[in-house]
Amino acid sequence: MVKDTQKRLDVVPSQRPSVISAPTPSVVDVPHPKVAPSPLVDAADAPAARSAAVRRPVWIGLAAGMALAVAAGGAVYAADQKAQVAREKALDAHVRVDRATLAAAGDAAVERTTDQIVAPAAYAASRAAATATAQSTVTHANATLAAAPNAGDAPRAALAAATGAVGTALTAPGVSLASLRSLVAGVAAPEKAAVDAQAAWQAAENARIAAEQAAAAAQAQAAAAARASTPSRSTTRTTTTKPATTAPVAPTTGGVPAGGLVCKGSGGSGASESSVSAIGSAINAYRSSLGLPQLGVSRSGSLVAHAINMANTGGIWHSGGDNIVACVSNGSASAMVSAWSRSPSHDAQMRRTDVSSMAVGGAALNGWLFGAVKFS
């Protein structure tokens, strides 16, 4: 027992100071070495010495922690500075994008404004051209109607309807440009049909007149042959002298002079002056359709008398004071002009550009119209 006690007394225990860790988890405190009590310290001062020894590593740890905290704060500040610079750069980029977008929008607005100016101007020009074409189409179609009185009811009605539709569109508000052009295009077919029908009628009429003239010539030859074969007889007759009558050519069968044309179904007595102004207006309408200038129209007494003579006789021939003569069965001046237009020699007279006026004579009998015109 005494031995064990002695053994424990031989061992002098050493003091291990307390360990205080710094605030930063990454720093590990190093244990302070064992310190034996100084022999110069009194027994009464030993506790104070041990306390000072314990506080020394604590302050050292605190100082190290503070240094680490300052370093960490500097790193955080530097990171914040970098983030701020990045935000400023991003904002500047957004500003540049916005400015570019606004500039592009401004250019688009300018382009839209230009389109709003150019497009209506182009449309107005197209509209004016289409309107002029439509008016010209109506004028030409009306002239065709006037020149095709014998085309038949159906072709004339179809052409009149197509022309009327174009005329209505020209005055109606809100008609689209496409609709106007479509209506104009729809006039061509009925106009051609009317012209063709009139030409067919005229061809048949010419053939009829030629056949009648051939028959009349054959009859005249037969009569002449019969007279030549009859023996002459001597007779005594009292002759009475009468004033001579004016006749440009000796009459043949039917009273129509040689070289003239018989208008079958016409003739008689009581013809009267008629349609002088109508004949002149129809000729001028035909000239207008060809782009030719209008001619002055005047009544000619001698041509009126010639027209009356032809109407009563039932045929047509030149008197020497006219350029063209004609007869039509329906009493229409436009039909007369249409007939002239299909004869090259007569059409050339109506198309003359070396004249400025025309003298006209006209007569009517039993629904027939006879005319004679002199251009000068």
Image: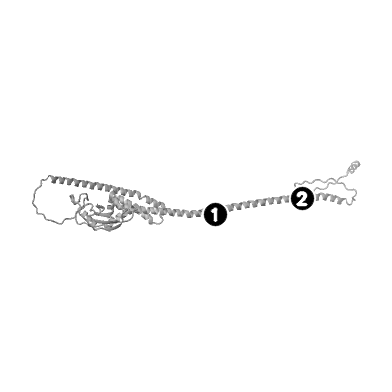
* Residue 101 pos. (x, y %): 57, 52
Q: Residue at x 47, y 54 (%)?
A: 118
Viewer-nearest residue: 329 or 33: 329
Q: Residue at x 65, y 52 (%)?
A: 88
Colour convention: one colour
* Residue 255 pos. (x, y %): 18, 51
Q: Is residue 153 visible?
A: no
Query: With 295 as the anchor, is 81 left or right in this view?
Result: right
Location of residue 106 by image quarter: bottom right
Q: Quadrant of the C terminus?
A: bottom left
* Residue 56 pos. (x, y %): 82, 50
Q: Residue at x 15, y 46 (%)?
A: 224
Q: Quadrant of the N terminus?
A: top right
Instruction: Name the residue carrying label 2.
Output: 67
Viewer-nearest residue: 248 or 2: 248
Location of residue 299 by image quarter: bottom left
Query: With 168 as the anchor, is 302 left or right in this view?
Result: left
Query: With 90 as the anchor, is 345 left or right in this view?
Result: left
Disc 1 element: helix
Viewer-nearest residue: 40 or 147: 147
The image shows a total of numbered marks equal to 2
| Category of crowding for the residue at label 1, using alpha-carbon neighbours closer than 10 angstroms: few (below 14), some (14–19), many (at least 20) | few
- Amino acid of disc 1: Gly
Viewer-nearest residue: 229 or 85: 229
* Residue 314 pos. (x, y %): 21, 52
- Amino acid of disc 2: Ala
Instruction: Name the residue carrying label 1.
Output: 106
